[in-house]
Image (cartoon, rainbow, N blue to C red):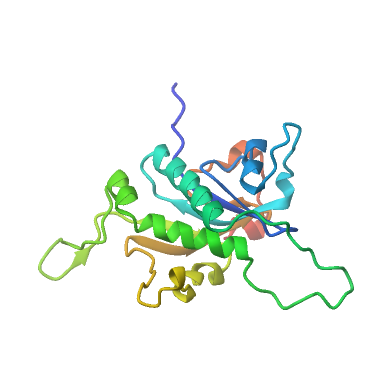
Amino acid sequence: MASRKPVPNLYMFRNMITSKVLVSPKFQLEPTLLRQIGEHRPSAKIRADHWVPFAVLTGLRAHTSAEFLADRIVADSLFKNPLSKPTLPLRGSEQYQPWTIPEAVRQRTIELCKLLNSEEFQSQENLSDALTETDESAQEFPRSLELHWERDEYQHVVSDADVEQDQDQVLMWPMFVDHRKLKLLRNRYPVVDGLDLKGFRLMPTKQEAEL
């Protein structure tokens, strides 16, 4: 029997220690992704337990769309914001500050929003912000994508963004994007369409099963 073709998703991970970000069309993290953050050594290994998804986009039709988004988010972010060495707070020092949205998370989120608004992506996925008449009393969008967030604050960086210092240019999420709370199993594995958690041999706890 033929295996079911996996559903394409876009995964955005943050490092729990450095706050750096990796973007991938697959949940499984591969060492080559470290090039996104300046690691080019062939022997570089990735610590999957250091990375947690902070956003997952589901509902895509084509794997090429997920790959397009991942490639463009990384390329555009690096062009506008060259890699810099992260500064880690010293334990027990006064350098600890109240929690703020990591800059890399903010940058990648803004780039994602721009790409979802682009004609190139919408044409590729056959999406539109235009409403269609379904009957005399109701209107709806032909199709929607779901964007799952680890924290609500990440979603709202777009509304607070000053796009390229142009106050007249307002950046908004497309109307075909529905925002959802990201449910994580073991604080790492996203419970979303398109990712078969059985492949990771995970047994959810009673509390996790009720999510």
Q: Is residue 128 above or below residue 68?
A: below
Residue at screen point 73% across, 35% down: 41
Q: Choose between 85 and 178: the one closer to the eye.
A: 85
Residue at screen point 67% across, 46% down: 38
Q: Quadrant of the C terminus?
A: bottom right
Residue farthest left in this picture: 136
Q: Quadrant of the N terminus?
A: top left
Q: Choose between 108 and 186: the one closer to the eye.
A: 108
Q: Is residue 26 above or below residue 94?
A: above
Residue farthest top in this picture: 1
Q: Position of residue 15 (x, y in %)?
A: 69, 55
Q: Position of residue 196 (x, y in %)?
A: 54, 41
Q: Position of residue 119 (x, y in %)?
A: 29, 52
Residue 19 visible in the shown view: yes
Residue at screen point 44% across, 23% down: 2
Q: Quadrant of the rendered structure where residue 81 is?
A: bottom right
Q: Is residue 156 above or below residue 197?
A: below
Q: Is residue 4 above or below residue 81?
A: above
Query: In the image, is 2 to the left or to the right of 96?
Result: left
Q: Position of residue 197 (x, y in %)?
A: 59, 43
